[in-house]
Image: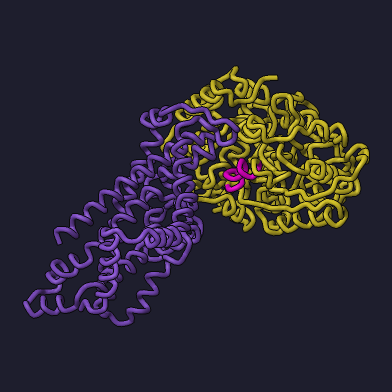
Amino acid sequence: MTKRISFIFASVALLAVACGGSTNGPATPRPASQAPAGSIPAGPAASTPAASTEPTGTVNLLVGIAEEPAIEQRLNDQVKEFNDSHPNIQVKRESLDNDQLRTVIQTRLSSGSVDLFGYDTGPGFGGVLARAGLLADMGPAYDRYRWPVFDWAKARCTYKGVLSCLPGQVEEVGIYYNKTMFDADGYSEPKTLDDLKTIMDGLKAKGITPLAFGDQPKWPAGHQFSMTLSNIVGRDGLDARFYGEKHWNDAETVKAIDIFFKQFKDAGYFPKDPNAVTYEDANALFYSGKAAMIPTGTWLVSEITEKAKFDVGFMAFPSIDGSSISPPAGLGGGLFVNANSKNPDAAFAYIDWLLKPEQIKKWDLGTFASIPAVPIDASSVTVSPLFGKVLSDLAASSGTSGTFGYNIDVLAPAAFNDVMSDGFQNVLAGKETPQGLADKLEAAYQKAMAAGDTIQKP
Amino acid sequence: MTVGTAPVSTGIRGFLAARRAGRPRQARRTSRALVAVFVGPSLLIYLMFMVYPFLGTVMLSLTSWDGFARTKDFIGLDNYVVLLGDEAFWNALVHNLLWAVVGTAAPILIGLPLAIVLWSGARFRLAFRAMYFLPVILPSVVAGIIWGWIYNPLFGVLNSLLEGVGLGSFTNGWLGDPDTALWAVLGAAIWGAFGTLVVFFLAGLQGIDLNLIDAARVDGANAWQRTRHVILPGIAPMFTFVLTITLVGAFSVFDIIYVLTLGGPGTATEVLAGYAYKMAFGRNFAGYGSAVAMIIAALSLVLAIAFLKIRERGQVSG
């Protein structure tokens, strides 16, 4: 089931450029809170100059809990390996439910009981902490250790000119499909929306749920919206909306909402009552073969590889009426150091260890199937066919800076995300029209802009 | 009847009389020290964990704090003024009111008859008592998860049951449909609550003098008349207490809704506590969230005082 990927992924560097466009453009997706808690960005430290004195002490690491117990265990193993090889530093890892993390983070940072923590990088997350003076300036550590993080990714961690985090894994949102089922039915990856609808109609006629989409937790809808809107308006169109040059209630936005949340729902492409279907149940539908496709992000590669007993393919949402294909991509959160940390140097030493090429190969690529925001050399790394496909797709798509879109909820302010998550459930329930939701999105964004809570144009 | 209590009573009276008469200073100091020893620790805990956070929330509600900044800008009553025109707030309040009515009436209507039946000596009453109390020992989060499975549109027992009895057309995504979600969550909450009420009512029923029941029976009162004129007045104080705690609970309900629906679909099951949480931690409007929390506190306080007054009036007139 595994194959050897023997190509050097310098091209992933290009992917990263694509993800960020410029070094200051908006970046990526899903709540870091959803990301495997320790799939922390990694990459080859170009050359780590030994510190004059080896840092010592305890590093209290606080992260969101991994969705899978097995992954959580591996994350603990990763920390143990560091501790065993660094007797002078002890990392104490603590993982919390992601919602709980958000409620306690201010208190924990202020009290100094956390040195290093994983959190989202968006303006409503890391940006707020930076404004409150709770984040350490990591610029000197970057200089000292020469971490080769992509500029676009560093831009996502820079608040008011201060580099304040280490970017998390690079993620893309797309559609996983049951390749075995597709092959048996003679389907190939759809290139257009019409192709996709034809396939879904065929699957539905056979009693298979075409798309395992569950929106009970509210956040998945934002990813689907990101897929359709990214394709329709492209990266530049998204930039224009984020910078307030275009509106969130124009015809293109309405169309993006309408396609996925109205047309697909009305056509019966989802499980019945997607508002009541959890993310885990939607995934289970796919694993059990009752659903043919599942729209979600590359953070699920590891779990899918483990649980799906059939061949799985990964594709971007197809072209909509001749549009480009711009799958949402970017960062899955970041690692921050507490401004009140008593031991920041030990925290930086731990980060540096994570970025060692051998650690990246073993943990990020080999264990967590995650892609760090640094140039990586994937030669001699054994990965699953699915992860290999994801890596090559990302690399192949990285030729132009306009290839990728954004995952909107990472870059949008919290109030906008709230309107989005409630609103998509209402559209799915038939209680709201796509235009009505778009109008609310526009109002929320304008309000956030006026309050200075949106990302700034470089 | 009063033999056993006389010495105590006399002692207290004696103490008070002595105080009035002007006892030696040393004795007064001792009694004050005793009061401090007994009341002090609990008062300290109460001040630290109840009064201080409460006052802190009052202060926060008068600021525009985002939950993270080191400074908290005082904005007076602005948050409360904004609340008045906040459609989402009123929407949540309506849900709370509905919860208060249905979530109070239903457990009482279920719990009171069951308690009376158990009290009147039904067979297997111990087993039934344990069975009714079982949901109470489950944390509401666990109860929420269980009910999430029951309502699940893919494999839920409820839909399977409906299909099994030929009512497949009534199957639904109970928690995903805005028209049914609140009722579905209420159903789960009622299941979790009525057992507690059974226990409370049973405790109240234990205090009724059985001679009164016998006398009523001898006078020819039927079961309903005995319930109406003897049992219900006998448990009136407990009834008021139960009403108070369930109504106050209705305005602070949060956990079971959070587990089952996150306030969704949309805001179909959003209540004030959930809205306060969303504002404070989801949108980083900690000041505004605190203002919502203060409204919850105010509503609860008014209700609690009102029912205590009713209870006192009942006791006086009784």
Q: Is residue A205 above or below residue B230?
A: above
Left or right placement of residue A431 versus residue A157 in this view: left
**Magenta stretch: includes residue A107:** yes
Rendering coords of residue B262 (x, y %)? 49, 47
Looking at the image, the residue that sits furthest to the left is B219
In the image, which residues are magenta?
A100-109
**Magenta stretch: includes residue B256:** no
Numbered-mark total: 0
Rendering coords of residue B104 (x, y %)? 30, 55
Residue at left 28%, top 63%? B18
Q: Is residue A348 above or below residue A287?
A: above
Query: Quadrant of residue B235 in the image?
Result: bottom left
Query: Quadrant of residue B110 in the image?
Result: bottom left
Looking at the image, the residue that sits furthest to the top is A245
Q: Chain B hue?
A: purple
Rendering coords of residue A182 (x, y %)? 67, 49
Left or right placement of residue A110 versus residue B231 in this view: right
Q: Which chain is yellow?
A: A
Left or right placement of residue A20 versus residue B269 in this view: right
Q: Nearer the viewer, residue B97 or A408?
A: B97
Q: Quadrant of the C terminus of chain A?
A: top right
